[in-house]
Amino acid sequence: MSIPPTRPDRDRSWQEVVVLAGLSAVPYAGGPLSVVADELLARRRRRVAELGVAVLEGHDVEDLLDRLRSDERFGELFVRAAEATAISGWEPKRRAMGAVIRSALDGEDAELDDSELLIAALERLEAPHFAALQRLDQAPDSKMGDARAEQDAGLAAPVLAGLLSTGAVSQGSGWGGMIYASSDFGRRLLGLVAL
């Protein structure tokens, strides 16, 4: 299934109209800025359309619509994934979101619980988090990995905080300080983005 290109004559939300009108009023740069903003908004819509295509792989549109109508939790999960997909510039994360929602569409409540946890983590993590997680996962010599402290591991504080808060890494103490390693959940996330 291909994604139709966005059309300049499509209906825009009132928020988009206000943003574009405001930008166009800026002297000298307003016209180009409104064109750039319009393209960025169109890119977000295409990303959400890509999510829909990924979710529908092997399904009928009616399957998705029935589940969205009948299961409020699934509907909210779908919206969260669509919002996160729209603003993510990292394609592996967007593909992972589609795979998780497709799995939730097939599954029962237990699968939905799992999908909610995966989507929550994917919403918060981006490419730098996954690069660090992969490095920790491939670390030799220790059950907890080779990162003795966040600065020794080369992990920026925001990256480490994101990984810890989502449960993607586990933390322990060692002779040289804290030791960090990818958790089972973190390895599942790595498998979804398939670096």
Image (cartoon, grey):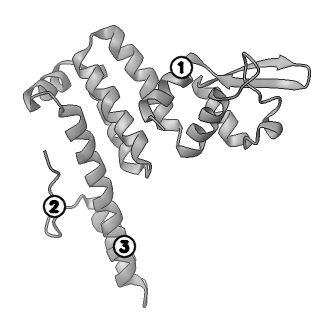
In the rendered structure, are the residues bearing label 2 and label 1 in contact, judged by CB atoms less than 8 Å apart? no
Q: Are marks 3 and 2 in contact (CB under 8 Å)?
A: no
Query: Which residue does the image show at 56% across and 17% down from the upper left?
Result: 184
User: Could you say which disc has been placed on residue 185 in the image?
Assistant: 1
User: Which of the 4 image quadrants contains residue 26?
Assistant: bottom left
Mark 2 — residue? 11
Q: Quadrant of residue 130?
A: top right
Query: Residue 9: image x %, image y %?
Result: 13, 69
Instruction: State the image coordinates of residue 79 (x, y, percent, origin top left).
Output: 31, 35
Please give left or right for residue 172 compared with residue 62 in the image: right
Q: Residue at x 72, y 15 (%)?
A: 143
Q: Marks 3 and 2, how far apart in space?
A: 18 Å
Secondary structure type for disc 1: helix
* Badge 3 or badge 1: first in the primary sequence: 3
Q: Residue 113 at x, y = what percent?
A: 39, 14
Where's residue 57, x and y in %? 18, 32
Going by the numbered disc 3, the residue's amino acid type is Val
**Residue at which label 3 appears:** 36
Q: Residues within 10 Å of mark 3 (few under 14, many from 20)?
A: some
Q: Quadrant of the N terminus?
A: top left
Q: Is residue 102 above or below residue 132?
A: above
Tell me if residue 3 can be seen.
Answer: yes
Circle 2 — which element? loop
Q: Residue at x 35, y 39 (%)?
A: 95
Q: Nearer the viewer, mark 3 or mark 1?
A: 1
Question: Tags 3 and 1 in contact by the CB under 8 Å rule?
Answer: no
- In the picture, measured across the screen, residue 91 lies left or right of residue 125, that is left
Give the label, 2 or 1, closer to the camera: 1
